[in-house]
Amino acid sequence: NRLLPDVYIYTDHFTGPESGLSPGFGLSLVAETTTGCLLSADAAAERATLPEELGEQGSRLLCEEISRGGCVDTVSQPLALLLMALGPEDVSRLRIGKLTPYSIAMLRCMR
């Protein structure tokens, strides 16, 4: 790729018994920032979903994760906040983007 020399694509393809006889397919995308943070997005196909549509959906989700900023993606936010709450006070720092509704609910329960 001439325009983006630091984009790497890896594929992992399984069918039949190797895939657990799964009838569908999915996509996992991971982006690494220049500081080493990993942001991810997952998409799974539903019935009558074309692979191209799933690719667009997955890439849109990854772009949303990147635009939110921070070093923790939305799926990992609640776990990171919980681990910070369990540790000693004034020891942990974390940069996250906009809080998800699930993270907000968890913080309310912890209070």
Image (cartoon, rainbow, N blue to C red):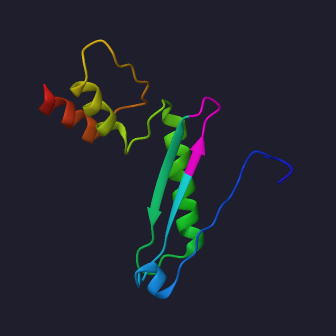
Compared to 48, does 6 lie above or below?
A: above
Q: Give the total of numbered labels.
A: 0
In the rendered structure, the answer to whether residue 77 lies left or right of residue 108 reads right
Q: Position of residue 84 (x, y in %)?
A: 29, 26
In the rendered structure, the answer to whether residue 80 lies left or right of residue 86 reads right
Q: Position of residue 34 (x, y in %)?
A: 65, 31
Q: Position of residue 89 (x, y in %)?
A: 25, 14
Residue at 48% in and 74% down: 25
Residue 73 placement: quadrant: top left
Residue 96 placement: quadrant: top left
Compared to 73, does 13 lie above or below?
A: below
Residue projecting furthest to the right: 2
Compared to 53, does 28 lie above or below?
A: above
Query: Which part of the image, by quadrant, shows the N terminus?
Result: bottom right
In the rendered structure, the answer to whether residue 94 lies left or right of residue 108 reads right
| Stretch in magenta | 30-36
Residue at 61% in and 35% down: 33
Query: Which part of the image, by quadrant, shows the C terminus?
Result: top left
Residue at 30% in and 39% down: 79
Asked whether 35 falls inside the magenta stretch, the response is: yes
Asked whether 23 falls inside the magenta stretch, the response is: no
| Nearer the observer, 75 or 91 | 91
Residue at 57% in and 55% down: 59
Residue projecting furthest to the top: 90
In the rendered structure, the answer to whether residue 105 lies left or right of residue 44 reads left
